[in-house]
Image (tube, rainbow, N blue to C red):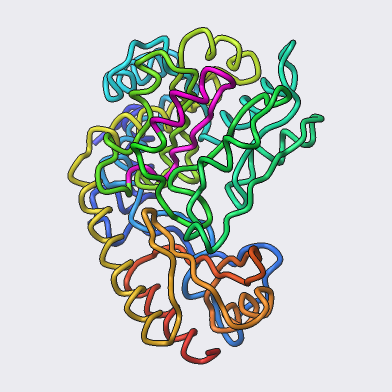
């Protein structure tokens, strides 16, 4: 039977994927060794738990859509990007002009930091908790801004202390940045307190809330600050498909803010122009796949419950987690802990703050979590 070119390409891509209609449990990325880590002794890495990726995604529907979109890869995605932007706007309950698309939230955080660095008559300092996700602070410093960091401490339960952030705001503050749930601690800021903060502080300086992990909170709509944008406050929200949707390698994200803010920030972004045909169509399919999101969240909670129990069994006390990773204090230098876990075939991340070394472990499949706990037994 003869096939035209498009049908042949589509059949070839489907065959190459092999997983387009497979159960989500089989849709896991290859486990790669992160750069700079010691290779495990005697074999390949068993569990990549260092990047907060979703091992169950992209969903089978998203993979199928990628295979269908691949033959159109010679086309720019403009038409589909416009439809996707409207789809996001409808999902968030805002007009389309309140949405700025990007290749992951990383592009948009970079754009926001550049906007803060180069806008006229603005403060030269960004106030942020420490530690937090460093993409925006790192770019801001490279472009001449100063970071005013507010340390997370035990007295606050390592939660972001909004009063302390407020105390650091002055005439030279150009932006407040925070990640909620925070990365690397995974702690959720109380939404009522954060709304009050947005209302009072937003009149003085823009507030950027990075909501990369908001889908893992008990009620994402209630915990999100998008409603502050709708009410006209000086708040900027970034979201990503890299986590619960499993798009870390596909790169899709968006920003929600008042149109006048987005118009300025968009000057430092591609305005959605870097979204590929396959990515934007797959993201559209994933946004509609509520069953997969439910499945993914459920599996993540199973892994989290298992991990919490295992950590406490070995005498570790994890911080409360509202994300797809867990942080806990460790009893050796962080570099040593990471290196010894890598020797067991497990990659994790480490931090040092408040005079303590910490491990951050991403939540993987149950097999990956068992590999982590097996490794923990050996080195503890």
Q: Is residue 8 on the magenta stretch?
A: no
- Residue 222, compared with residue 55, is above or below; it is above
Is residue 233 left or right of 293 when viewed as pictured?
right
* Residue 62 in sight here: yes
Residue 70, relative to residue 121: is it above or below?
Answer: below
Indicate the position of residue 128 as horizontal and vertical percent values: 61, 40
Along the viewing direction, whichever of 156 and 256 lies nearer the viewer:
156
Q: Which residues are magenta?
A: 195-215
57 vs 253, nearest the viewer: 253
Number of on-image labels: 0
Choose between 129 and 47: the one closer to the eye.
129
Residue 32 placed where, x, y %?
A: 55, 64
Residue at x-position 72% and y-position 36%: 139
Asked if residue 65 lies left or right of residue 273, the reply is left
* Residue located at (55% from left, 9% from top): 263
Residue reaching furthest to the left: 291
Residue 380 location (% of width, % of height): 53, 90
204 part of magenta stretch: yes
């Amino acid at each position: 039977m003869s096939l035209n070119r498009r049908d042949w390409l589509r059949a070839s891509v489907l065959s190459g994927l092999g997983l387009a209609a497979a159960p989500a449990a089989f849709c896991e990325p290859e486990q790669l060794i992160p750069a700079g880590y010691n290779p495990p002794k005697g074999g390949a890495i068993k569990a990549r738990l260092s990047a907060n990726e979703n091992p169950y995604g992209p969903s089978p529907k998203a993979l199928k859509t990628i295979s269908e979109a691949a033959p159109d890869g010679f086309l720019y995605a403009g038409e589909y990007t416009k439809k996707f932007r409207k789809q996001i706007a409808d999902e968030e309950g805002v007009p389309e002009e309140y949405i700025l698309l990007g290749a992951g939230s990383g592009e948009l955080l970079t754009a926001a930091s550049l906007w803060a660095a180069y806008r006229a008559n603005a403060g030269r300092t960004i106030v942020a908790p420490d530690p937090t996700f460093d993409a925006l602070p790192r770019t801001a410093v490279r472009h001449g801004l100063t970071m005013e960091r507010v340390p997370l401490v035990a007295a606050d339960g390592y939660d972001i202390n909004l009063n302390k952030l407020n105390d650091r705001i002055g005439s030279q503050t150009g932006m407040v940045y925070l990640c909620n749930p925070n990365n690397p601690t995974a702690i959720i800021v109380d939404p009522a307190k954060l709304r009050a903060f947005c209302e009072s502080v937003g009149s003085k300086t823009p507030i950027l809330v990075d909501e990369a992990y908001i889908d893992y909170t008990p009620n994402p709509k209630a915990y999100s600050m998008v409603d502050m944008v709708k009410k006209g406050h000086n708040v900027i929200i970034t979201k990503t498909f890299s986590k619960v949707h499993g798009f870390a390698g596909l790169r899709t994200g968006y920003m929600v803010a008042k149109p006048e803010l987005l118009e300025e920030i968009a000057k430092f972004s591609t305005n959605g122009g870097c979204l590929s045909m396959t990515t934007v169509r797959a993201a559209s399919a994933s946004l509609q796949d509520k069953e997969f999101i439910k499945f993914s969240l459920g599996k993540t909670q199973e892994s989290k419950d298992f991990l919490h129990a295992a950590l406490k069994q070995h005498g570790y006390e994890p911080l409360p987690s509202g994300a797809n990773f867990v942080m806990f204090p460790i009893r050796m230098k962080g570099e040593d802990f990471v290196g010894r876990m890598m020797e067991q075939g497990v990659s994790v991340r480490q931090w040092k703050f408040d005079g303590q070394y910490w491990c951050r472990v991403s939540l993987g499949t149950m097999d990956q979590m068992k590999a982590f706990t097996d490794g923990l037994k050996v080195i503890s």
